[in-house]
Image (cartoon, grey):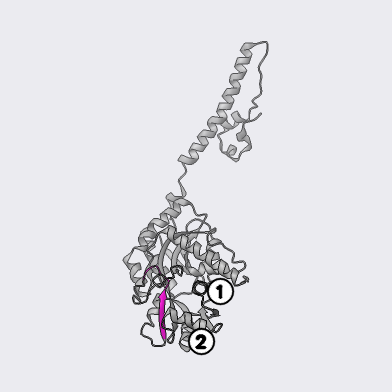
Amino acid sequence: MFCLLTDAPLFALLSPCDRRACEQPLTDHRSKSNAGVETASGGIVMIRLWSCVRAALCLLASLFVSCPTVAQDYPSRPIILVVPFPAGGSTDIVARITSQELSKRIGVPVVVENRPGGGTIVGSLSVKSAKPDGYTLLLSTNTFYASALSQKNPGYDPFRDFVTLVPLASAAYVLIAPRDVRTLDDLIERSKAQPGQSNYGSLGTGASQMVLAEQLKEAIGIDWQEVPYKGAADAILAIMRGDVQGFFGTDGLAAQYVKNPDVNLLATSGAKRSSYIPGVPTFAELGHPEIYDLGLFAVAARSETPDQIVQVLRQHLASVARAPELLQVLKSNSLEPYEGTLVEYDTLAQDRYARSATILRKLGFTAK
């Protein structure tokens, strides 16, 4: 019988003396006729066994005590923050001020890398394929989750493959309607009076605009169909022409049309009224609290990232989220600082994801 260490990878790390002790067979040399020999042989067996145990314990102790942890050396080189959108948009602007403020706090450069394409899939996959060492992060938005549903093989699971570090910003959605639809009740009555003739604008399958419109359809019985547009500006023009009867734009976008006579702002999807359009009620105020959603911005990392590194990043990013420099950029881009907890953020993201999946199944959508 040999010491179990001889079959383990750790055996190669033992000292030559301890290795020889473990390699000696622990045979039983006891003699039935000689008690003295029996005692001596038994002692030899126990000594050899103890040598193996001692060597194993010393080796394990050295691994835990002598070797520095990964977190002690983190970070030791630049960090990359991947933005899955082109440069110049609001997501890119938020990412750049975030990178600047994080660099000040964490002590190494934080470089923004724009990786647009595939509805954020290109950028998301670039982070998933990187080592989970905290040196490649993702600036995530609602599209990050929507794309995982609308594509047959997106290549990532937003919850299994990524972990949220810190939510940064939010934006409520506002139901924008043509000038002849002044209230939510007007929209309902028009839909009932002209069944099958109402439409809503969306920015793609699984996007928040579609999910909210379909929720509204189910909650209050609006009979309308989706008309997809390439961007919010196109959808607003369609509203002004009367081509569609509703579109969920962000509150920052809607604020630009408060005084426009060709559109009306009916309700917001936030838990409270938007500071940018305080005169517009929430859906909850109108009796429909189930119509709730936010556009969210957060920083995420690979889910396999060591916990020590995750905690380092969360500590510094939490400080970034409160930085006056970031708050000023959010305000200038009609965004609000995220006011909830990390748990509340993850719960909202998971709830929206589940709602979106249910709606797509009901619509018979097949991912391509």
Q: Is residue 184 left or right of residue 359?
A: left
Q: Dot 1, crowdedness within 10 Å: few (<14), some or many (≥20)?
A: many
Task: Kindly identify which residue carries mark 1.
Answer: 205
Task: Kindly identify which residue carries mark 2.
Answer: 243
Which image quarter: residue 365?
Answer: bottom right
Q: Please give the count of numbered marks on the rendered protein.
A: 2
Question: Is 40 contained in the magenta span?
Answer: no
Residue 123 showing in the rendered view: no
Query: Seen from this angle, which residue lies furthest right?
Result: 32
Amino acid bearing label 2: Asp
Q: Quadrant of the N terminus?
A: top right
What number is the disc on residue 266? none
Determine the main secondary structure of the stretch shown in magenta: strand
Relative to 30, residue 145 above or below: below
Residue displayed at 66% across by 19% down: 29
Amino acid bearing label 1: Thr
> Quick one: SS at disc 1?
loop
In terms of depth relative to the viewer, which is nearer, 143 or 341?
341
Mark 2 and mark 1 lie on one chain; the one further toward the N terminus is: 1
In terms of depth relative to the viewer, which is nearer, 54 or 199?
199
